[in-house]
Image (cartoon, rainbow, N blue to C red):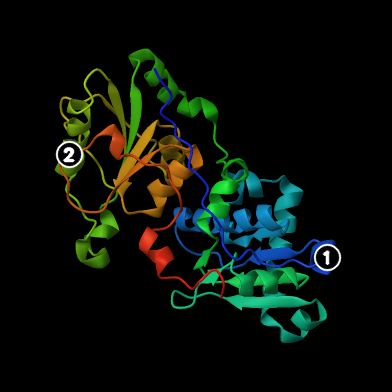
């Protein structure tokens, strides 16, 4: 079976931040402090921070993953490491809340909001970070230019790899080889989407079923197995006539299972976008009700957020 995993092509970055010899002599520390949001949202923030870290050789402290440390390679540690992380969290919080300590330690505090997001790779923010010994960023809206994200994608994937029992996921590769099929991840998110944006991305189960059938019909000669991950219970009679299996049913398990597929589809959501990015696999984003799907409709992930959000952010040169 041919390999369908596609590689995203890095884009050009304009206005790369100036870095003086003094700025690059001492390694800087970037702290992403605020730990809130769903797992996918936190990992998205972590991915952007790691991209910046790789590009500019900055040490990064991912306090945004607090509570998930034992589940992610980057933050996994032994008992001593766990104690150190708890102490670090208290210390960085203390520094962030003390103007005096920030001045003594040459620390810059940067806040991010939806109206005023932090673009790490912009000239203004990168200069602040690279000219300070330490920078602490509070808030959820933190981004890096997508070309930098894609440039360092392989390293980010390794650093954010989930810590799981691999034997629990061999059913995916076994199914792929046994059936000689492409595994298509289907992410169904309905729960909170009934109200979110007036239900814009709240699609009926029948639409996901029809898309799966359409993909099968439009790809004559190919065999598919659909791995379905949903935030609502799905009956055994769903996806009738199709070869399908259930995902693990946990946030981390579903995230990792989807990343192991050959293709993934789902609504506008950080969760399936991140899964496709971590797996390096093509993705189809369901932005509105559709009834037909082909393999050619799947695209490599070029960024971790919705395209129009990037267009509405401040310029890279701000």
- Residue 277 at x, y = what percent? 47, 44
Sort mark 1 into few (<14), some (14-19) or many (20+) by Cα contacts within 10 Å. Answer: few
- Residue 232 at x, y = what percent? 27, 47
Residue 91 sits in which quadrant?
bottom right
Q: Is residue 236 visible?
A: no
Give the residue displayed 37% in from the left and 20% down from the top.
175
- Residue 138 at x, y = what percent? 58, 72
- Is residue 208 found left or right of 264 in the rendered image? left
Foreground residue among 5 and 188: 5
2 and 1 marks in contact (CB < 8 Å): no
Q: CA distance from mark 2 to mark 1?
A: 55 Å
Give the residue displayed 38% in from the left and 46% down from the top.
272
Q: Earlier in the sequence, mark 2 or mark 1?
A: 1
Q: Is residue 53 visible?
A: yes
Foreground residue among 245 and 129: 129
SS type, badge 1? helix
- Is residue 307 found left or right of 190 in the rendered image? right
- Above or below: residue 195 compared with residue 240: below
Residue 307 sits in which quadrant?
bottom left
According to the picture, the residue beneath numbered tag 1 turns out to be: 21
Please state which of the two labelled residues, at mark 2 or mark 1, is closer to the viewer: 1
Q: Quadrant of the N terminus?
A: top left
- Above or below: residue 123 compared with residue 247: below
Give the residue displayed 63% in from the left and 43% down from the top.
155
According to the picture, the residue beneath numbered tag 2 turns out to be: 292
Sort mark 2 into few (<14), some (14-19) or many (20+) by Cα contacts within 10 Å. Answer: some
- Is residue 33 found left or right of 88 in the rendered image? left
Give the residue displayed 79% in from the left and 68% down from the top.
20
- Is residue 56 found left or right of 40 in the rendered image? right
């Amino acid at each position: 079976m041919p390999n369908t995993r596609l590689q995203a092509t890095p884009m050009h970055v304009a206005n790369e931040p100036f870095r003086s010899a003094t700025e690059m002599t001492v390694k800087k520390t970037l702290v992403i402090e605020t730990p809130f949001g769903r797992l996918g949202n936190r990992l998205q923030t972590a991915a952007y921070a790691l991209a910046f870290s790789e590009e500019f050789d900055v040490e990064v402290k991912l306090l945004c993953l607090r509570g998930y440390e034992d589940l992610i390679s980057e933050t996994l540690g032994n008992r001593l490491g766990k104690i150190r992380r708890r102490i670090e969290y208290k210390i960085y919080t203390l520094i962030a809340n003390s103007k005096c300590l920030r001045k003594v330690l040459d620390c810059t505090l940067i806040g991010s909001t939806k109206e005023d997001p932090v673009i790490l790779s912009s000239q203004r923010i990168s200069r602040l970070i690279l000219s300070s010994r330490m920078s602490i960023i509070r808030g959820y809206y933190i981004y890096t230019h997508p070309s930098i994200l894609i440039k360092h994608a392989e390293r980010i994937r390794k650093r954010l790899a989930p810590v799981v029992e691999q034997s629990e996921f061999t059913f995916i590769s076994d199914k792929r080889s046994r059936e000689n099929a492409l595994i298509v991840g289907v992410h169904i998110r309905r729960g909170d989407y009934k109200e979110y944006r007036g239900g814009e991305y709240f699609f009926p189960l029948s639409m996901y079923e029809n898309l799966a059938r359409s993909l099968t019909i439009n790809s004559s000669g190919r065999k598919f197995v659909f791995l379905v991950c949903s935030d609502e219970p799905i009956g055994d009679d769903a996806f009738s006539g199709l070869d399908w299996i259930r995902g693990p049913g946990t946030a981390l398990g579903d995230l990792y299972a989807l990343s192991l597929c050959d293709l993934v589809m789902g609504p506008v959501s950080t969760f399936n976008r991140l899964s496709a990015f971590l797996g390096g696999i093509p993705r189809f984003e369901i932005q509105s009700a559709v009834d037909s799907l082909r393999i050619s409709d799947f695209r490599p992930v070029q960024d971790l957020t919705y395209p129009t959000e990037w267009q509405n952010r401040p310029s890279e040169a701000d």
